[in-house]
Amino acid sequence: MVGAALMKGDQAGDPAVYIEDLSVKIDGRRVLEEVNLRIREGEFLGVIGPNGGGKTTLLRAILGLIKPERGRIEVFGKSPEAARRQIGYLPQKSLFDQKFPISALEVVMMGRYAVRGIFGRYTAQDFEAARKAISLVGMADYADREIGSLSGGQQQRVFVARAIVSSPRLLLLDEPASGIDSAMQIEFYELLGELNKRLTIIMVSHDISAISAHVKKVACVSRKLYYHDSKELLAEDIEEAYHCPVEMIAHGIPHRVLRPHD
């Protein structure tokens, strides 16, 4: 666990995300406490933790959607509010009417609101950016298809395109593989690996094995944050976070699993 506050100037260049002594309360309940984290540009951080542990709250705090009780957050050296246009976000569930007649390309265009504003008119530049984004996620052939007619995995690719269409430097993903079948999940994680060549990614997931296989660094959040600036989490960190025993299992890729517990 990162116990002491990180020194901002300990390495060359400003980090993509810098969090110092962060605590957050929601409805009188402390959801995050004494969180310290430094994420360099180009990293792919996976965040695991039990339900209700504060993973989504952490993402929303980085977005500036939640005000901390105390502590500091900087994104590319700015406040989260000032840096918001440099952040792409894919929430846990993208709710929409499956029967609403809107094409995949039109969904991606919604991501240009950050540039044009809700009431701004789209330009040729916006359409070009949308087509580039949808092509980048491998969905160019489906651009004119109604979003409701696509599979879960295809829809998630479109939503990722919407999140990156305004050329963010940081991409936040909250359980992005939820509802995608296992075969499509592999392709989806490969897509994220390609996107990581262009931008910094923070991904929340409940799937410990998937996180271990596809990300560069791993953190565990259960009110406090457990992080060792590496892909390996100590067994005692996970046990403290999940309040249950874990063991190491190796099937090609070593990963930690939760043993049966009460």
Image: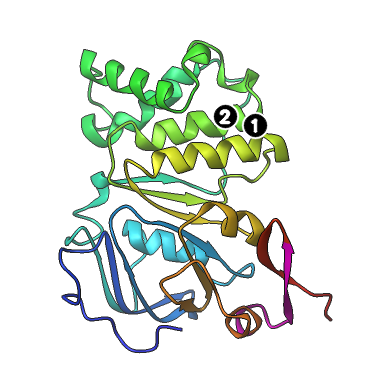
Whether pointer 2 and pointer 1 mark residues with C-beta atoms closer than 8 Å, the reply is yes
Magenta span of residues: 240-250
Q: Horizontally, is 72 left or right of 142 in the view?
A: left
Q: Horizontally, is 242 left or right of 155 in the view?
A: right
Label 2 SS? helix
Camera sees residue 61: yes
Q: Residue 249 magenta-drawn?
A: yes
Work out whether residue 228 or residue 251 is closer to the camera in this orientation and state it. 251
- Residue at image x 19%, y 72%? 11
Q: Which residue is mark 2?
A: 155
Q: Horizontally, is 7 left or right of 189 in the view?
A: left
Q: Residue furthest front?
A: 252
Q: How is the image coloured?
A: rainbow
Q: Which residue is mark 1?
A: 152
Across and down, in percent, residue 165 comes to 33, 31
**Badge 1 amino acid:** Gly
Work out whether residue 208 or residue 50 is closer to the camera in this orientation and state it. 208
**Badge 2 amino acid:** Gln
Mark 1: give few (<14), some (14-19) or many (20+) Cα within 10 Å.
Answer: some
Label 1 SS? helix
Across and down, in percent, residue 171 comes to 38, 47
Across and down, in percent, residue 220 comes to 53, 72
Q: Which mark is residue 229?
A: none
Q: CA separation, marks 2 and 1?
A: 5 Å
Across and down, in percent, residue 155 comes to 57, 29
- Residue at image x 34%, y 56%? 63
Q: Horizontally, is 230 left or right of 241 in the view?
A: left
Q: Residue 156 magenta-drawn?
A: no
Measured along the vertical axis of the image, is residue 91 above or below residue 187? below
Q: How many marks?
A: 2
